[in-house]
Image: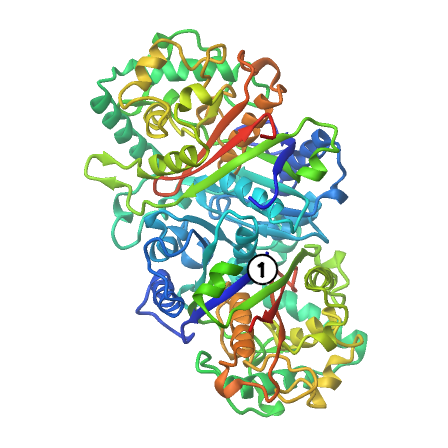
Amino acid sequence: MARRVAIVGIGQTYHRSKRPDVNIGELSAEAVRAALEDAEVSANEIGAYVTGNMELFEGRYAQDMWQADYIGAVGKPGIRVTTGGTTGGTLASVAFEYVASGVYDMVMALGFEKQSEGDTRAGLKTVADPLWSRWYTTGAIGYFASQARFYMKQAGAPEEAGSMVRLRLAKHAALNPHAHLRLDLQSVEQIMESPYLIPPLRQMDMCPTSEGACAIVVASEEKASKMARKPVWVKDWISVHKEVVYIRGERHSVADLEMAAGKLFQRNGITRPMEEICVAEIYGPCTWAELEWLEAYGFCEKGQAWRLEEKGQFYLDREFPVNPSGGVVCTNPIGATALIRVAEVALQLRGGAGNHQIARRPTVGFSSAWGGSGWTVAHLLSATKD
Amino acid sequence: MRVGIVAVAQNRFGDYPEWRPHELTYLVVEDVLKKAGLPFRDGYDDIVTCSSDHWDGKTLSDIEHGEVAGAHLGPGETKVSLDGANAVLLGYIKVLSGHADVVLVTAACKENQVMDPSVIENFGFDVPYHQLLGLDFTQAAALQATSYMHKFGLKREDFAEVAVKGLKNAKDNPYFFNGGDMTVEEVLGSQMLSYPITSVERRPFCDGACALILAKEERARELTDRPVWIRGVGSCYDHHNLGDRDLTEPAALFRAAQDACGMAGLKAPDKEIDVFEISEHYSYQLLLWMEGLGLCARGEAAKLLRAGELDRGGRMPVNPSGGLLGGVPRYVAGANRVIEAFYQLRGEAEGRAMPREPRVALAHGTYGPAGQHHCVIILERGF
């Protein structure tokens, strides 16, 4: 990396299934304002804007254009990057690259989604190739139902495993004022009563459609060292957009996740990820995805994630907390979702997560994005510069 | 650190109903890798694609564009959903950041598969105000063109001259389909789209793709003995609300150019830059953007055009390639400007080459209603 990069400001809106009180620009502005306040800088100091969301989900076009006035981007450099579900992760990566390049000293990354303005499922249906697979594509639920079935079979997991994940996420979300679904769930049995969407996937296993935005301020080492907030340092980042067709018979590919984490950990000298990484915010659109992907990222052996879940290993008072924010299953404004993962890890590393601050004093954190056809983007953040 | 462009490729733009958008990308990826002598596997560390879900008619258009660019083999991929010049800018940033040594940049759009482009453009306006007016980008441009005429006493003929010169130059460009000899009267007599813009004065909608290989200095020198360096970049947003802007003041372009020239250490762009490739999506924009770039006094660009100073052999050659009126798809447009500048600097412009050998070039891309976002890239011959 040409220059060290740090996260110096974090902002989030509150997330709801509908935000009729604001338009997309106003929603975005809430997150940007929060990030500026957190960083204690004025919009004038932002050198460039990196923004993005799901292009088709709102039924709007070139949203950076009419968003520009709301977020302070007028008269400023900026770029719009959209990589589907991984958009939030890509936004962070591009902001890191902007600053690391030496061209810009302070950059605002903004992800947002306001799904009630359009038809998410209609947008998502067009993700499938119009010639080969559009006829069987219905959205995310069918995909994750078969993913859950696959995981159960491979890992020998009982149906309760998904509900165990859901219980943890509910307990975490209850402590996070920004989480969308803050349900008072007390037992696995309670979750097992939730209706099936497609067995074994239950309503409570699946992420909601949320509206919200997230923004982070990224700064160079020189700027960061002069700022009020304790900077959170960026160690490394990687994107793997490898898979094109992600359903191969009954097998779901996690090749992108394996490759991303493999390369990222290898080049950062991480050999025992679960011990060396103190907190993980995993982009898991459903409970079952969290289990399968914790294994794919190499945090535990194949088939072991649900057993660790059963022992409560991923709770925020344990050694390896996963999604202390409540995760994607509790909050999913798609274009912002993966950026929230980065933001939440940064909050944990600077000790600013409030009620959902993890018990362990974290030094290194991992955040991931998921989307596209099995794609991932992953980041390593550090509480210290080295 | 210096970043070089080592190879470029583009389709002959046109109407390709038989090909899907990413198949157009595949053709240029194959071509650019061959030119750079790079393998498809492990030949580059990162990919920047540029396309639009709306124009491709598909969520995540970069699944396909990424695949044909080799993303399935594991290098990173980032999609830019803005004019193609920004994809080149991001590729440059990626190399500078130290996160990649060699980057493949692609841009593609298949405008002809869209039944009603106006609908997409209209959805690019803010919901509460402009969208309800039913505006598209051509109508926004028409408002800008009339303000420009009014402020500086320009005539429709001044704009038509841009088209006459552009189409004439485009005849020499093997990648452009829309070259031709037209008179000012013929331009003005073509179908009126939105006063004062006639059909000949709007960039024709078409299909195509382009690709570039960017590399850090050592790698660039290994890959070619004739690299073209990227010396400066700049971009900037303007206000969205057309009423909040003085449409005759391209303030965002001015800022983008200032940043790019500043990085490149240029103080007098009109004298220190030898060739300009400007994105005129509409005829009048060539003149307005020249003024925004600070190349002449306000309202004076039309006179320079008439005096022949913008010709290939003129004092300040602008769009020797023929420009966007020659037929370049949106999203490809700004990246195509960079590619045309590259050809000029490498001495590979063939029939559209200039009598003088250029050393420094400026490429410009713009997107959004009435040029709301601009991107400027300064290039220098590295041999």
Q: Is residue B242 above or below residue A221?
A: below
Image location of residue A356, percent across then percent down: 56, 15
Image location of residue B172, percent across then percent down: 49, 87
Q: Secondary structure at mark 1?
A: loop
Q: Is residue A80 above or below residue B151?
A: above
Left/right of residue A53 with respect to residue B274 in the rendered view: left
What colour-coding does the image apply?
rainbow
For mark 1, what is the residue?
B2
Image location of residue B210, percent across then percent down: 44, 67
Left/right of residue B370 with respect to residue A345 in the rendered view: right
Inspect this view and state whether residue A115 appears. Answer: no
Foreground residue among B207 and B173? B173
Q: Residues within 10 Å of mark 1 (few under 14, many from 20)?
A: some
Residue at 31% x, 31% y is A144
Residue at 45% x, 64% y is B222
Query: What type is the residue that disc 1 sits on?
Result: Arg
Inspect this view and state whether residue B291 appears. Answer: yes
Tally the marks: 1
- For the C terminus of chain A, the quadrant is top right
Tag 1 subunit: B
Foreground residue among A208 and B226? B226
